Image: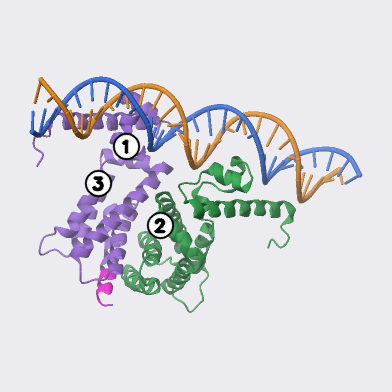
Chain colours: A green, B purple, C orange, D blue
Amino acid sequence: MAETPGRRERKKAATRRTIADAALRLFFERGYDAVGIRDVAAEADVAVTTLFSHFASKEALVFDQDESVERRLVAAATEREPGEGLVAALRRETHALVRHCTAGAAADLWRMIDATEALRRYEMAMRRRHAEALAEALAGAAPDHGEVARQALARFVVDAFGVARTAEDPAAAVDEVFHMIDAAWAAAGSS
Amino acid sequence: MAETPGRRERKKAATRRTIADAALRLFFERGYDAVGIRDVAAEADVAVTTLFSHFASKEALVFDQDESVERRLVAAATEREPGEGLVAALRRETHALVRHCTAGAAADLWRMIDATEALRRYEMAMRRRHAEALAEALAGAAPDHGEVARQALARFVVDAFGVARTAEDPAAAVDEVFHMIDAAWAAAGSS
DNA sequence: ACCGTAACGCTAACCGTTAGTGTTTTGAAT
DNA sequence: ATTCAAAACACTAACGGTTAGCGTTACGGT
């Protein structure tokens, strides 16, 4: 799908990328709080209103992969291999997400996020959305469990990501937390 | 401690309460978003800057019991009865907190919170703080477990509160989620 | 009685965000 | 080819939460 997006959409995507690039450049140079929306718009050479037609908020300039993460989490729950258990699939995806966050250029970004109040807040709201989306997906993927148990599992998985991201050994932390989640999920089944 | 707070502190407390009362009155009358900070200040007959010297933000006007909840959670972990297990103490406290949120006049407040974006966000940030405070308390209360397991437990407990608060049967939901947490915590011990 | 301090007030502004309005570009239908 | 509706983009102006700067008053300890 979407092999020839058309000129309009290409231009739109280009503008979006121009804005995001300008924003990250300035944020890394001067720090997130020291850069205003008007600065970003000027650097990208667009109007402020144009910027907000591409990004819903200042924080959204930083969390651009947002929806992608959500989709991956949901996909891990709904489109898993026949032989793989639900929790195992979620653990595998969490491993991948954590690896992605702690390696390479993304690490700098997350350092900035952790150092900035407003961004930490946005991250929380984001994760809440992810947990809600995952809980909804679980309704189809684990109909034999109750709503409460599914909601808890969804939050626990998102927590695992949060805990592991800041742990000394992220990969080991994912395994450790998922060991706990495994037990919790098993206990939920035998209620 | 603090049996005779002195006139100054009494006046300060009175001003604070006047502001909070005025705010809640207006919020319930017109809705949170329809009331401006300048409206609240006028209703309480104080300057806007005075309002912000008592409350850090508009949302803080609604979440006034904030620190109390945090203290109770921490106390449940650190000052429990000798015969009571750690998770059992946290479950008991969570039961009490949920009951407090879903009964009486507080229920109206939480209805407003759930209906307002900005307040839901603040609640998330608040809960994150609670989880962090609890995790720190757990370092002393459960030194035989690793840092990762303690952080996970802290988040799970706060999740239990969040899941139960909106469940059909809040009390049963607390028990259900804590049954999962029990299993998770036991699994963390035998890693 | 005195002085440092903290509460309170006022003005003015900053910053993220949005409404209102108009212009240009683009894709598609005629 | 021409025309048309939609969408991107821009500009101005404002709104609402929040803060800085500065002055005034009331309190509490000495």
Circle 3 is placed at which residue position? Answer: B67
Circle 1 is placed at which residue position? Answer: B61
Q: Earlier in the sequence, mark 1 or mark 3?
A: 1
Q: Nearer the viewer, mark 2 or mark 1?
A: 2
Q: Give, as a three-letter code, the residue at label 1.
A: Leu
Q: Is residue A85 left or right of residue B169?
A: right
Q: Chain of mark 1?
A: B
Tell me, yes or no, if residue A53 can be seen here: no
Q: Is residue B185 magenta?
A: yes
Q: Give, as a three-letter code, the residue at label 2.
A: Asp
Q: Main secondary structure of the magenta part?
A: helix
Residue B27 to residue A171: above or below:
above
Work out how far the residue at label 1 is from the one at label 3, CA to CA, in angstroms: 13 Å
Residue D14 rendering spot, x and y as whole percentages? 53, 27
Q: Secondary structure at mark 3?
A: helix
Name the residue located 30 percent from the left edge and 37 percent from the top edge: B55
Image quadrant where residue B87 sits = bottom left
Quick check: marks 2 and 1 in contact, CB under 8 Å?
Answer: no
Name the residue located 33 percent from the left edge and 42 percent from the top edge: B110
Tell me, yes or no, if residue A109 can be seen here: yes
Q: Nearer the viewer, mark 3 or mark 2?
A: 2
**Range shown magenta:** B183-190
Q: Secondary structure at mark 2?
A: helix
Q: Chain of mark 2?
A: A
Circle 2 is placed at which residue position? Answer: A114
Mark 2, other Cα within 10 Å: few <14 / some 14–19 / many ≥20: some
Q: Give, as a three-letter code, the residue at label 3.
A: Glu
Residue A84 rendering spot, x and y as whole percentages? 46, 77
Mark number for residue A172? none
Residue B111 to residue B152: above or below:
above
Image quadrant where residue B128 sits = bottom left
